Image (spheres, grey):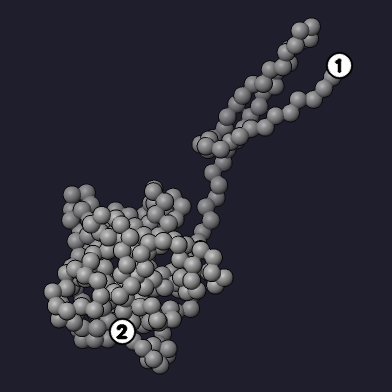
Amino acid sequence: ATGELSFGINAAGLAAGTYTATVTASATGYSSAALQVNLTVENQAPVAQTIKINFQDAATVPPTGWLKDYGRPFGPRTTTEQGSASGSATYSYGWKKRSDGSPLDLSANGRARLSGTTYTNASEALKLQSSLMHMQANNIAGSFSGVKQEGYWEISLPNGFYNVSLSVGDYNQGSEPESHTINVEGVNAINAFVPTGSTGAVATRIKSTASPIRVEVKDGALTINASETINGVAYNGVNTKINSL
């Protein structure tokens, strides 16, 4: 008598490579038969995606194509201008306390230095440069209409490599000391930038990464902070403000 034998292979969890197995069929009174199976596991091609975040106040409409972060604690972002227009969660991102990693509400720390028609008529670059989030308001000695806590920002992302560009600084000239420092996934991106010049002098008051920073996410979240010791070197900002990412 003859028949058919079928089987499947579960390749979940297998590293990329070539695998060989031998399947042997035997029964009393019949000659045994052997079948060699070759299995090739390939890495899935990564899906490129671009995520653009503007750090600002809650009321301002972000530039076209940009999502806004206005200081909400880390969690699913489901509203228009933060997630998808339909309201379903597209990303999870937000703020955590630098001291213990618990969720932190910095919604009173976002700023838009331009408003009204001045903002509406501004270029995309100027809209991004003139908005910010106070990451280290704990360094402010004087009065402050926000939360004087140091926070760090995270976004949930698949593990892998990412190119990150960002900018820091303050469009407005102030009296409080500031030295802007940003670290991304254990890589220093900007160190001790001190703005100079009067209000609106974006060439000397705002600093962007000269080229994208290549980082690896290993724990399912991209982390951005303003104070960290990396390979024995302390990269600690003072009154750091992030503009965009």
Report which residue position mark 2 lands on. 113
* Left or right placement of residue 4 versus residue 242 in this view: right
- The quarter of the picture where residue 126 lies is bottom left
- The quarter of the picture where residue 240 lies is bottom left
The N terminus: image quadrant: top right
Q: Residue furthest right?
A: 1
* Left or right placement of residue 130 versus residue 77 in this view: left
The C terminus: image quadrant: bottom left
Q: Residue furthest bottom?
A: 117
- The quarter of the picture where residue 242 lies is bottom left
Can I make out residue 131 in this image?
Answer: no
- Element type at mark 1: loop
Residue 70 is situated, as x and y percent measured from the top left of the image, at: 36, 73
- The correct choice, above or below, for 95 with respect to 196 in the image is above
Q: Mark 2 Cα within 10 Å, few/some/many (few <14, many 20+)?
A: some
Q: CA distance from mark 2 to mark 1?
A: 84 Å
Residue at x-position 61% and y-position 34%: 10
Identity of the amino acid at label 1?
Ala
Report which residue position mark 1 lands on. 1
